[in-house]
Image: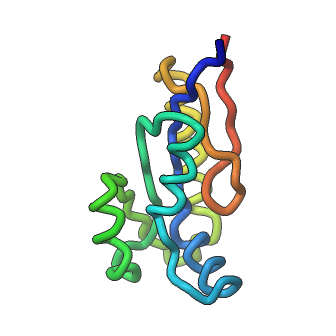
């Protein structure tokens, strides 16, 4: 019997939003991403990282889907990888402290690729 995945979803919203707008010429649809993940298992936690002051139009949809929004304030020196670092640290912390989670999405634009042992 195959074990059902317990998924932790981490979204680098600033990057994914830019990518979707520039390649697909539309707004990022968090519902479509979450629906695709639900086909693979149970989503047990959802985080999105961004400078939310610049993303007013997206916050409602994320709230409606119970995505925790983590505020990223850019530093005066620039903050190119700030969300990536926060996302990676949070994912690692969750991997080592939440045994019930056994997967995270492995799409570079959406989340950091981490797999937990299912043994």
Q: Does residue 110 appear left or right of residue 100 in this picture?
A: right
Which of these two is toward me, 46 or 40?
40
Left or right of 92 in this view: 56? left
Residue displayed at 69% across by 47% down: 106
Position of 102 relative to 91 (above/below) = above
Which quadrant is home to the N terminus?
top right
Residue 103 shows in the view: yes
Residue 109 sits above or below residue 56 on the image? above
Tell me the quarter of the image containing the C terminus. Answer: top right
Which residue is most to the front? Answer: 1
- Locate residue 19, reporting x and y percent: 65, 77
Residue 40 appears at what percent x and percent y?
Answer: 59, 39
**Tell me, what colour scheme is on the image?**
rainbow
Task: Identify which residue is drawn at 53% across, 50% down.
Answer: 10
* Label tally: 0
Depth check: give the residue in front, 106 or 29: 29
Q: Position of residue 112 (x, y in %)?
A: 66, 48
Residue in the foreground of this view, choosing between 12 and 103: 103
Is 89 placed left or right of 54 in the picture? right
Please identify the quarter of the rendering in which residue 108 is found. bottom right
User: Which residue shows up at 46% across the image and 64% down it?
Assistant: 30
Q: Residue at x 60, y 85 (%)?
A: 21
On screen, residue 6 above or below 33: above
């Amino acid at each position: 019997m195959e074990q059902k995945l317990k998924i932790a979803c981490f979204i680098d919203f600033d990057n994914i939003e830019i990518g979707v707008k520039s390649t697909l010429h539309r707004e990022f649809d968090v519902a479509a991403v979450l629906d695709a993940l639900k086909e693979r298992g149970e989503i047990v936690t959802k985080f999105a990282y961004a400078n939310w002051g610049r993303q007013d139009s997206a916050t409602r949809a994320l709230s409606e889907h119970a995505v925790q929004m983590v505020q990223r304030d850019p530093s005066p020196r620039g903050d190119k990888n700030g969300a990536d670092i926060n996302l990676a640290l949070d994912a690692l912390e969750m991997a080592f402290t939440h045994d019930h989670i056994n997967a995270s999405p492995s799409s570079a634009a959406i989340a950091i690729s981490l797999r937990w042992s299912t043994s």
